[in-house]
Image: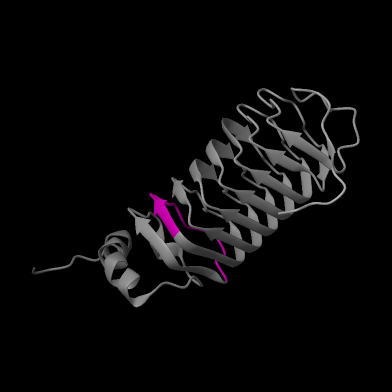
Amino acid sequence: MQIPDQRPFPHPSFAGQDLDLDGYRFDATDFTHAHAQGRTFLECTLVACDLGEAVFRGSRWSQCAWERVHGAGISLVEASLHDIVIDQCRLGAVSAWGSQWRGVTVRGGKIDFLNLRGAKLKNVMFEDCLISELDLQEATVDAVRFDGCRLVEPQFGRGRYTGLDLTGAELVSPQGVAGLRGARVSRLQLLDLGPVLALEAGIEVAGP
């Protein structure tokens, strides 16, 4: 994702609480333990940055890109992400409950423990990525697609899943599938999900 007219962030570590974060390029900037609650990032690019334990609670991201970013323990609680590309990132323990995602593309990479409980997602695409323990419980989902993704132990339930397309995903040990009303799965996935649906609905299946 090319964003024109960016200027390099002038410090090796993030200390931009008092800066206008508009049009910056962060190359290998150290965001570990950064406190950027409520900050706005407009037309910024993060490249190979370490976001370990960074706090972005209530932050707003618009027309930004994350490329090869890594880190664990990241807080995006109640953050807003609009027109964002997250490309080839390796992230862990991402707490993004109550966040809003619109026009977001997550491409490649790996995310462990992605908490999107109660989040609102619209026009979001996950492509060719591995996500372990994705929590979409109580989420409001509209036009969200997983293409070429492997979802390990995803959790669903008590959410609104209009336009959630799981046909391009490999689902490993999913939970809460009985609550996936409105979602789209393939015929093969439905066969695989049958025993889980029966178990969650309390249906006893007799015979081989």
Per the picture, the main secondary structure of the magenta-coloured stretch is loop
Could you tell whether 66 is left or right of 5 in the image? Answer: left
The quarter of the image holding the N terminus is bottom right
* Residue 179 image point, x, y percent: 45, 63
For the C terminus, the quadrant is bottom left
| 64 left or right of 133 in image | right
> Residue drawn 54% across and 38% down?
91
Name above or below for residue 163 compared with residue 175. below
Residue 190 rendering spot, x and y as whole percentages: 33, 72
Name the outermost residue toward the bottom: 187
Query: Relative to 171, does residue 185 appear above or below in the rendering?
Result: below
| Horizontal relation, residue 2 to residue 66: left or right | right
Nearer to us in this view, 24 or 191 = 24
| Left or right: 157 as drawn, with respect to 173 | right
Q: How is the image coloured?
A: one colour
* Number of numbered discs visible in the structure rendering: 0
Image location (x, y in percent) of residue 52 = 60, 27
Q: Going by the picture, which residue comes out furthest to the left?
A: 208
The residue that appears at 80% across and 23% down in the rendered structure is 11
Q: Nearer the viewer, residue 60 or 182?
A: 60
Residue, x 52% and y 53% (percent of image)? 136
Q: Residue at x 67, y 40 (%)?
A: 77
Q: Quadrant of residue 82?
A: bottom right
Range drawn in magenta: 149-162
Q: Is residue 64 magenta?
A: no
Q: Residue 117 at what x, y percent from top left? A: 57, 48
The magenta stretch spans residue 159: yes
